[in-house]
Structure formats: structure tokens, C-alpha cells
Image (cartoon, rainbow, N blue to C red):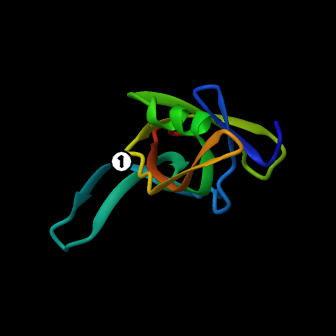
Amino acid sequence: MDLTKIKINGVELTRPPEFSPKREDVYAGEYTTCKGETIADRIGWKYSDLSLQWEALPQSMVEGLVSMQGVCTIEFDDADGEIHTEHIIRSSTVHLRNRNTICGVTWWKNVQTEVRFLNVHD
């Protein structure tokens, strides 16, 4: 896969400039002791929720974002040379600010949406 691209539900998109998924630990069985200490078991890690932002996207790519319903897939290179496929859910609407037509192609400026990663890994 091209390092300048990501895929959401098979739709190839320009990789957002700030796209750099971070990993966070996932805990279960969390409780607070009578001394006020919080105790939990680490069960794995997942990618942190993030904002996808583009300065501009053509209409065809925006349609891929707008059509995201329920659980979707995202494919990307995590800078380790491997393609990762994760399940995500869109957690905000797709914000569209301005529309322009350039040489017959509709472009949207300042496109943004939030996604939540669902997969937990060992």
C-alpha cells in the first residue's frame, strides 16, 4: 500500500497529514481499594481514538467518509512496513466547510471526522 494513502471500507483516501495512530493500554476488572488505590488487569492494547483531518478532498473520497455506517475497516501502514487492518466506528459527523469546483471536479476544504478504534490486541 502507498504510504500516502489509507483505505476506509476499501475506498482509497489521501492519508491525512497528521495521521499517526498511537497505542494505548486496555484494562479490565478495574476497582478501587479501601485505601483509594485503583487496581486493574492489563488485557492488551488498541489504537487511540483520533481525528481525521484533510485540507481538501475530492467529492468521491468525501462520499466514502459520509457513507461510513456502523463498524467499518481502515487499512494503513503503521510506519513498521506492514499493512494493518482495524475495525473503527465513526464517532462524529463528517464536517464539511467549503465546496469548490476545479476543472469539473468538486473539492471540499477542511474536511474532518472522528473515529474510534475497536480492536484490542495482545
- Tell me the residue at 35%/55% (across/down): 40
- Tell me the residue at 45%/35% (across/down): 66
Q: Nearer the viewer, residue 37 or 75?
A: 75
Task: Kindly identify the amino acid type of the residue bearing the numbered disc 1.
Answer: Ser
In the image, is residue 118 above or below residue 26? above
Q: In x, y percent, where is residue 4?
A: 78, 49
Residue furthest to the bottom in view is 35
Q: In x, y percent, where is residue 12?
A: 69, 34
- Tell me the residue at 59%/58% (across/down): 22
Q: As drawn, is 112 to the left or to the right of 2?
A: left
Q: Which residue is mark 1?
A: 92
**Helix, strand, or loop for circle 1?**
loop
Q: Nearer the viewer, residue 21 or 18?
A: 18
How many residues crowd mark 1 within 10 Å: few (<14), some (14–19), many (20+)?
Answer: few
Q: Is residue 117 visible?
A: yes
Which quadrant would the N terminus be assigned to in this image?
top right
Q: Nearer the viewer, residue 106 or 87?
A: 106
In the image, is residue 103 above or below residue 60? below
Which quadrant would the C terminus be assigned to in this image?
top right
Residue furthest to the front in view is 103
Residue furthest to the left in view is 34
Q: Nearer the viewer, residue 72 or 86?
A: 72
Q: In x, y percent, where is residue 25?
A: 49, 55
Q: As drawn, is 69 to the left or to the right of 80?
A: left
In the image, is residue 56 above or below residue 71? below
Q: As drawn, is 67 to the left or to the right of 40?
A: right
- Snapshot quadrant of residue 77: top right
Q: Is residue 119 visible?
A: no
- Tell me the residue at 20%/73% (across/down): 36
